[in-house]
Image (cartoon, rainbow, N blue to C red):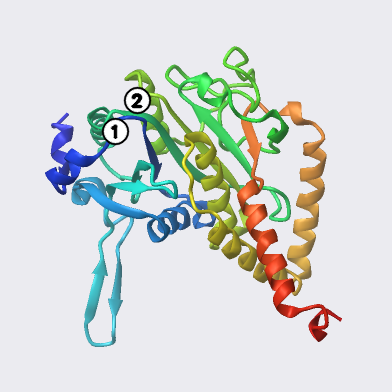
Amino acid sequence: MRDPRDLYSFESMDVLAAVPREGLMLVHALPGLVDAGNSCRIAATYLRDQLRHMKLVSFDIDELLDYRGSRPQAVFDGLSYTSVDIPSLSLTLMYDEADRPFLFLDGPEPDLQWKRFGQAVIDLVEYFEVERVVGMQAVPMAVPHTRPIGLFAHANDPSLLAGESSEDEVGAPDRSVGQGEAPAGSSSHPAGGGPDQPSEGAEIVVPASFGALLEFELGRSGHPAMGYAAQIPHYLTRTDFPAGALALLRRISDATGLELPLVDLGDLTDAATGALQATLAQNAEVRQIVTALEEQYDTMREDQDGSPMATTMDLPTADEIGDHFERFLADQDVEGPDDPRRL
């Protein structure tokens, strides 16, 4: 293997010197062949738009991507090409709403040199003395959009999942992605269970993502790593689904203690859901599919012990609920008690 350090370069030594080396979290979003609902891409773009950040490390994308398999987008104005959008893969220093720093790795999932790129990330985890690595993923599932979004939880250390609330646990209707009995270096158990309560489901084999390899290799190197996979309605896989991004960022906020801005993304989710409901109202065939999925979901919900995978449900945080309630009251005050719109 060629030196993994040749895959990346630092942006500024002055900035690197100022990066704190205590309690750093590393969050990664590396969407690959399947990013259901574009959830990871939406989450990454949202964090960049909302949080103060600066680039620390750039990776040599030419070494990692097969452009024939994932072609860049080019803009053609009828006479000439005005731009070609070559993707980038970088490690960024971000600050949450409490001004707490964390690292964010995002970009397309590499097509090539997974082991070398994985070792490069591990080198950076050790260089920045990262405390925990948390990843996100979104997968299509036979679930309805009218129910709370389920998330598969996984980790290379069972104790990382011990903090999951048992009240959020729910059985998953399918086993297409997630963890059964995990291989060495990775583990999973039902949300709300402790480290001495591993999942006892049948072992399953699934196509690996780079995030799976990274979590596994981090475990072998002694670094805690975990992640969440949001279960996105399969009929919305190719549609922007902000609710998936919101579910992932809520869980990542819980797992890392980071104060991520979620209210604006909640508003975007509400607007997208309203538009989706209006669209479905005009399509009887799709409504029938959603109704059938709702019945299946509710039936499986009654049997929460049937899933071998750690699955939690996405629910609004107290801050989000409070913010929406305050804005509701403010709208009522503006309209006034005699406003004809209230009659």
Side of 94 where 310 appears, left or right: right
Kindly identify the amino acid type of the residue bearing the numbered disc 2. Glu
Contact between marks 2 and 1 (CB within 8 A): the answer is yes
Q: Nearer the viewer, residue 26 or 109?
A: 26
- Tag on residue 217? 2
Q: Specify whether residue 156 is in view.
A: yes
Q: Nearer the viewer, residue 189 or 324?
A: 324
- Tag on residue 118? 1
User: Horizontal and vertical percent for residue 129?
Assistant: 28, 28
Q: Nearer the viewer, residue 300 or 56?
A: 56
User: Horizontal and vertical percent for residue 14?
Assistant: 14, 45
- Tag on residue 175? none
Question: Which quarter of the picture shows residue 328?
Answer: bottom right
Residue drawn at (70%, 59%) of the image: 325
Q: Residues within 10 Å of mark 2 (few under 14, many from 20)?
A: many
Kindly identify the amino acid type of the residue bearing the numbered disc 1. Gly
Q: Residues within 10 Å of mark 1 (few under 14, many from 20)?
A: many
As drawn, 259 above or below 235: above
User: Horizontal and vertical percent for residue 51?
Assistant: 39, 55
Residue drawn at (71%, 38%) of the image: 173
As drawn, 340 above or below 72: below
Mark 2 vs mark 1, CA separation in Å: 7 Å
Side of 343 where 190 appears, left or right: left
Q: Secondary structure at mark 2?
A: helix
